[in-house]
Amino acid sequence: MTSLQSSFTVLATTPTPRNSSLSKPSLLPTTNARRSHGFRFSCSSNGGGGVDRRNMLLGLGGLYGASNLISGRKANADPILPPDLSQCDPTGATTTSGGQTVSLDVDCCPPYTDIQSDYKLPSFTTPRVRPAANRGTLKPEYIAKYQLAIQRMRDLDVTDPDDPRGFTQQANIHCAYCNGPYDQPDHPGLDLQVHNSWLFFPFHRWYLYFFERILGSLIDDPTFAIPYWNWDNPRGMFMPEMFTFPGTPAYDANRDPSHIPTGTNPVVTLNVGSTVTDPVQIISNNLTQMYNEMIGTPASATDFMGQPYRDGDAPHGFSGGGTSEQGSHTAIHVWVGDPNNEYNEDMGNFYSAGRDPLFYCHHANVDRMWTLWKDIPADYSKEITDPDFLKSAFMFYDENKNLVRVTVADALDYKRMGYEYETSNTPWMNYRPQQRLVPANLESLSKTAQTVAKLFPLTLNNTVKVIVPKPATGKADETLVIENIITDNTKLVKFGVFINDEDDKPEEVDRAEYAGSFTQLPHRVKAKQSTGNLRLNLKELYENINIADDKSVVVTIVPIINGSAVTIGSVKIVPRVA
């Protein structure tokens, strides 16, 4: 690897804002100010003025109807529309510090051109095969090719900072779609957000698709595929070596230094906030986490994919995210991000995550989880046929610098997009927690618990135990709902949930009593707080804990990170609705 390191001239890993001549105050409130970009205008204008962008958008594939000229919900369909790239907030990402909104001096706005078209997927005869980054037999030639591709993308930052294929511009895509630079079309002041909803998986699939195609074009290899970080397999539960060498293009300085291999390989934890140090316990927790988010917890397609998000809807916040997004996806972001950095850059914050090449390797495995989940048998349909989902759309630049519009519908079949994943074992599929032979003593547990009426609402400063009545329906297929959760959007938050737990070992989530958890990654939206509910499917858990005919259960809620930034309104159990 030494010779590989010496063959590259490495750029700084922290991007420089593209239009540095723009002056930005260090402290400012969130505004709705927008900037019109002046980048390669080549369409003829109408009547001597500027290009009529609304008329231009009306011509894109028929999605934009005349009713869209009126602010508010459309009469026939409400898919999320692509952002107007000519209108972008130049203040970039902000966060809250000391009660004030602080500009992070990051310009997330992409280049703008008024030449836009619908994207048509090419026909692929041979799929690009995405290899596992932590496979021991990964060829040095592939690693060298990947490093070269990333280097050439970084070189564009220097030769043409406005080139949408450059590494900084590619990183800015995530910031632009996630941190508030874009408003929803025809809804001024309403953020466009692709996290915490059913847009999460399809947006990131398209993002990786174009990122991969650009890398391939920069090294003249259309068969090139990005690697995936197989953190769901014990053999992949450490940072891939190819990303860890200072001086190489895939290296990023803003990572947790305690998690970078230096003679040993620190084991990834998918249980955010865990202080477990025993590798065996960490791996067992990880496999249980994967089983729960992929199989045990989802009771519907939107439980896994994320909740509906339509035109005119405010961003959901944490309550809209699916089990995979809220679970392993968020855990890896937190594990890689640098805790010594005020904002946990790079991976630990939405606006900066794309600056780390490891982000794309991580999200390739997130995308792989979607492909695996689709093939796991379940008692619910895994298809979302809602037109508002299928017709939602995004804008990306392709490998030829063309600005193109893509839809969710065209991202549902990854094989049509010309790639597949190298096989990696998935031991978590058979890692259902061991069933308890003897049910917990509910009478004894109840002595240390309170009733719902007496306990809530509360701020989650300490572990709480609450007696929760079960529905009178007699069904074993039920859902735990933790209601009216309010969180501070600027903070990392985590709490765990257990049912009839006699052991009180919150660090061990590989137990039958573990129901699930809630994790929030710090993010910027116009509202400082998010409000929502956490729903946890109890069908398998009831079987695991061998629950008797008790009329209630004892729910334990354990604050793990920043519990004081969480308030909970109430807790209840309701019949499951698939």
Image (tube, grey):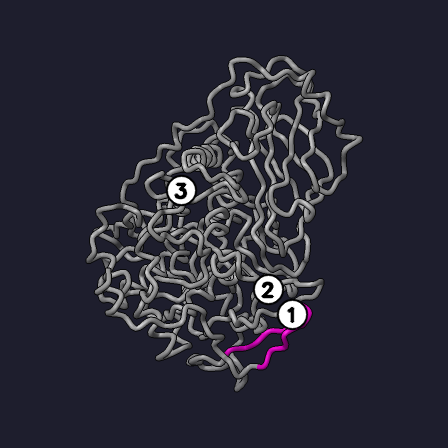
Spatial separation of the CA atoms under disc 1 and disc 3: 36 Å
Residue at the image position 58 percent from the left and 69 percent from the top: 104
Residue on which disc 1 sits: 32
Magenta span contains residue 473 = no
Q: Which mark is residue 369?
A: 3
Q: Residues within 10 Å of mark 2 (few under 14, many from 20)?
A: many
Which quadrant would residue 184 be assigned to in this image?
Answer: bottom right
Residue at the far front: name it: 263
**In this picture, is 44 found above or below 312?**
below
What is the three-letter code of the residue carrying label 1?
Answer: Asn
What is the three-letter code of the residue carrying label 2?
Answer: Asp
Say whether disc 1 or disc 3 marks the residue closer to the N-terminus: 1
Q: Is residue 381 in view from this perspective?
A: no
Say whether disc 3 or disc 2 marks the residue closer to the N-terminus: 2
Residue on which disc 2 sits: 183
Spatial separation of the CA atoms under disc 3 and disc 2: 30 Å
Q: Residue 401 versus residue 517: which sits nearer the camera?
A: 517
Residue 393 point in image, percent of width and height: 48, 57
Residue at the image position 53 percent from the left and 81 percent from the top: 50
